[in-house]
Image (spheres, rainbow, N blue to C red):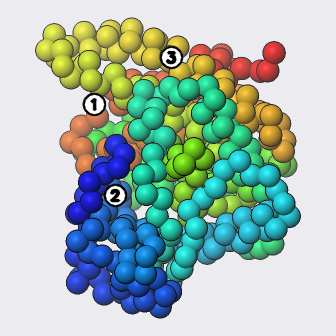
Amino acid sequence: MPAPATGRTVLEPPPLAAAPEVADLLAELGLGALLEEQAGAYQGRNDNWFGPTTGGGRVFVKRLGGRDVPQRLARMARFDRVLARARQDGAPLGWDTPELLGVRADTALVVFAHLDGAEPLCDLAPDGELPADLARALGRTLAEVHALPRPDDADAEPDEEPGPPAGPSRLGFLDFLSEKAWQAASAAELELWALLQHDTELAAAVRTLLHGDAGTPVRVPSHGDLRLDQFLRHDGRLHLTDWEEFRLAPPERDLGSLTGEFVHRAVRRLATGLDEDPALDDPRAAHAAIMRQGRLALEGIRPTVRAVLAGYRAHAPAPVDLHRVAALAGWHLFDRILAGARHANRLHPLDRAQAGIGRTLILAPQRSAAAIGLTEAP
C-alpha cells in the first residue's frame, strides 16, 4: 500500500482477487493491470482502488453502491458530455475534473485518471477557513459549473427535493418513519428524527423550503451533492469530483450546501477542546462552552464565506437569493448530522449545537445569513 502523499486517509484496498471485474474493465480499456502491491483505497462509503497500472498510468476505480446506480451512472455520463461541449465551445474554465476513462454499468464500476498528490479542501479547511484567494477560486468554480451548457437530455429526469440522501426519501420522514426505516436506523438517527418530527415549526419550515424550489424559474447545471472533500487541489488547480447527482437545479442549492460545509466544519472543530476538558462532562457546562466557542467559530468563517460569494458573483450566470442560500445551508447541517449519526449510539452535544444553528438558519434566514458571511455586495 502506498504512503499517503497528502493528509488523505489511505486504506488497504479490497482484495482484487475478490473483484476480478476490476481487472477485466481495466484490460478492456487498454489500461493494463493495477499493481496490487502499490494500490490503496480512500476512506468512503464505496469500494475503491487507486494506484499505478502496468500500462504506465494511474487510475482510480470506484464501485457505486446503494440505490439508483443506473441513474447515477447516467448523470455522470451526462456531466461528461456537458463538460466536453463547454470545452469545445472554448469556455475559459478555471477548474477541472478527473478524466473519466470508462464505465461498466453491469458491475457499477467507474474508472478515472488518478490525481496523485491531490489535496482535498476538507484537509485545507479543517476549521472551515480558507485563504481568501483559494476561497474566491472555489466560488468561481461553482459559478462556472452553473454556467455550463444545458444538458440536451436535461428534462429526461425530473428535479428532486434536496432531501437527506442518508435517510428516508422525500419529506415523509418529517411525519413518520416506516417500520423498515425504523428498524434499520441507529439510536442516534432515531434521536435526530424525533427532534425533527416533534419540532412542528421547524418541520413546517423545512417543507416550505424544500418545496419552495417549485416557484423558482432559474435552474442551472448543478453538482447536486457538494461537500468540501469533493474539491481537490492538484498542481495549483481545483478539481471537482463525484458527479453522480448532476442535474438542473436552482443555484441556491449548491451554494447553500457549500456554505453549510464551512459552518459544519467550524462547529465540528470545537470537539477537540470539548473532548479534552473533563470539566465539560456536565451537560450544562458543555452547552455553555459550545455556545461561547461557537460564536467565535462562526466569526472565523465569515471572511471565507464572503470570499467564496465574491468569487461566485464575479462569474455567476444569474443572481441568487441569499436568504434561500442561508436556509439551505441550515438544511445541509442536518444532512451532515444524519450522515454521522448512522453509526452512533447517541447524538453528540455538538450535533445538537449544529442542529440549533441549522434550525435558526432555516427559520430566520433574513436575520442569520449575515452571521455566517452571506451578505449583499457593497
Front position among marks 1 and 2: 2
* Quarter of the rendering containing residue 363: top right
In x, y percent, where is residue 316? Answer: 80, 41
* Quarter of the rendering containing residue 51: bottom left
Which type of secondary structure does the marked residue at label 3 adopt? helix
As drawn, 175 above or below 323 = below
In x, y percent, where is residue 39? Answer: 29, 68
Which residue type carries mark 3? Gly
- Do we see residue 258 in this rendering? yes
In the image, 313 versus 190, the foreground residue is: 313
In x, y percent, where is residue 234? Answer: 52, 49
For the residues bearing labels 3 and 2, Cβ distance under 8 angstroms: no
- Residue placed under numbered mark 2 in the picture: 42
Q: Which residue is painted at 57% across and 44% down in the image? A: 236
Q: Which residue is painted at 71% across and 20% down in the image? A: 375
Which residue type carries mark 1? His
Of labels 3 and 2, earlier in sequence is 2
- Residue placed under numbered mark 3 in the picture: 300
Q: CA distance from mark 3 to mark 2?
A: 30 Å
For mark 3, does the 10 Å Cα neighbourhood hold few (<14), some (14 to 19), or many (20 or more) residues? some
Which type of secondary structure does the marked residue at label 2 adopt? strand
Of labels 1 and 2, earlier in sequence is 2
Query: Relative to residue 266, is residue 75 drawn left or right?
Result: right
In the image, 43 versus 215, the foreground residue is: 43
For the residues bearing labels 1 and 2, Cβ distance under 8 angstroms: no
Q: Which residue is painted at 57% across and 71% down in the image? A: 100
